[in-house]
Amino acid sequence: MSRTLDVAIIGAGIMGCSCAYELARRGLKVGVLEKDTIGAGSTGKSSALIRQHYSNDLTARMALHSLRAFENMEEELGSDGGFTRVGFIAVTSAKDHAGLEANVALQHRVGIHSELLAPDALREIMPHIETSDLVAAAYEPEAGYADPNLTVNAYADAARRHGAVIQLNTPVTDVRFSGDRVAGVDTPDERYDAPLVLNCAGPWSAQVARRAGVELPVNACRAQVAFLQRPEGHEAPHPAVADFIHATYFRPETGNITLAGLIDPAEADAVVDPDDYNELHDDEFMLDVGERVSRRYPALWESRAAGGYASLYAITPDWHPIVDEVPAGSGFFACTGFSGHGFKLGPAVAVMVADLLTRVADPEFSPHLFRLARYAENDAVQGQYEYSIAG
Ligand SMILES: Cc1cc2nc3c(=O)[nH]c(=O)nc-3n(C[C@H](O)[C@H](O)[C@H](O)COP(=O)(O)OP(=O)(O)OC[C@H]3O[C@@H](n4cnc5c(N)ncnc54)[C@H](O)[C@@H]3O)c2cc1C
């Protein structure tokens, strides 16, 4: 690889690869340095739900932009990301009903196709869903899920076609500065000079930032996923569901499988060393998530546990990312901390980051909400629910 770049990107997950694509498409000379392989971090193990249920104008618009990108990926990137439309249902308790209504109203304002459904109408969409504890639910017919490995490789290949170089098995060991400006990055074998460096290292991003003397409040947290084999009579795919009452999400996977995980604030407490953690699922987790999901989809009481795994979320204090130049004016940018819900936002994040790095005066997606200083300013991102993954 040429050792002089316009932008050096650290990490080849969805963020590193989508940003590489967007920056290379705009004519910048981009190099992506990845310590392992494409999608080796959170991305490759993402549940990859593509929904638009968010509480802020910015995140809702980004989710909509990204949904359209997933739908048109083959046309734009030359290969598709395995987007499968199954629809998405969000259910909340009566206490969060006003928040649910507010989110649907926001969705309508930004052009998202979403409906507030009474329990009867919800059962027409998903006949086997338990609704006795519900006042209403939000339904997005256009939502679905993607294949995270196909998606990240589609971005990587498209970035390469625009001239980006992606170096695998190449850990960044140092971020170099010249005075107040970033000057490049070092790997065990090479020095790369670049006036712009983008930290897309996900769960490792705080370590990477520390090499440049920057503290980022991003923890690597263990998050588990379970596979449940649906019983006979339930072979047809069901919509994806986020159940804020039982703090769980689930979606169909190929082979009559339902994939399930938690949406539980306690996941932020499971801080681990991203280079040394248990990648297997726990038996207790399988029982717990199986029970939570079965309360919403009772047919799954008869399901069979079909394995699972653990991976990493990169979690910030408000479960929202940091997309910012830190320190200001340094040329060293953070694009990290997507806290368990970043995959779907990847296409829009690429536009946000490319506008930021190329100093576009009137960006489509202003990164102001995601600035690092919000924590010190006591202005963290707020969501409609206690658990701000939908913030
Ligand atoms: C179990 C699970 C379920 C999820 N479900 C969803 C979902 O349904 N919907 C959704 O939108 N999001 C979901 N997410 C979140 C989403 O997957 C992440 O937010 C997203 O993938 C983060 O991408 P990233 O590029 O920031 O980080 P990563 O994919 O972690 O990429 C970081 C990369 O940086 C590399 N790296 C680290 N340090 C260095 C270094 N020093 N030098 C070079 N390379 C380095 C790593 O090897 C890695 O490849 C889920 C995540 C998990 C784990």
Image (cartoon, rainbow, N blue to C red):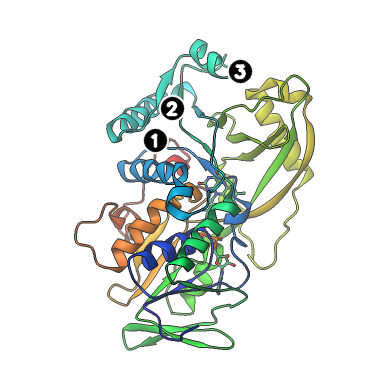
Q: Which residue is at the front of the view, 281 or 233?
A: 233
Q: Which residue lies furthest to the top in this view?
A: 120
Residue 108: give x, y in percent of width and height. Answer: 31, 29
Do the CB atoms of the residues marked 1 and 2 lie less than 8 Å apart? yes
Expressed as whole percent of the image width and height from the top left, the position of residue 152 reads 54, 57
* Circle nearer the N terminus (2, 3): 2
* Mark 1 crowd level (few <14, some 14–19, many ≥20, 10 Å Cα): many
Q: How far apart are marks 3 and 1 (CA)?
A: 23 Å
Element under disc 1: loop
Q: Do the residues labelled 2 and 3 touch (CB within 8 Å)?
A: no
Question: Which amino acid is tagged 2?
Answer: Asp
Q: What residue type is labelled 1?
A: Gln
Mark 1 or 2, nearer chain start: 2
Q: Mark 2 points at which residue?
A: 96
Real-space Cα separation, disc 1 to disc 2, in angstroms? 8 Å
Dot 2, crowdedness within 10 Å: few (<14), some or many (≥20)?
some
- Disc number at residue 130? 3
Rounded to the nearest angstrom, the CA distance separating label 2 from label 3 is 18 Å
**Ligand 1 location (quadrant):** bottom right
**Amino acid type of disc 3?**
Glu
Q: Given this view, does label 2 or label 3 mark the residue nearer the observer?
A: 3
User: Earlier along the polypeptide chain: callout 3 or callout 1?
Assistant: 3
Q: In this orientation, does residue 18 appear?
A: yes
Would you say 299 lies left or right of 107 here? right
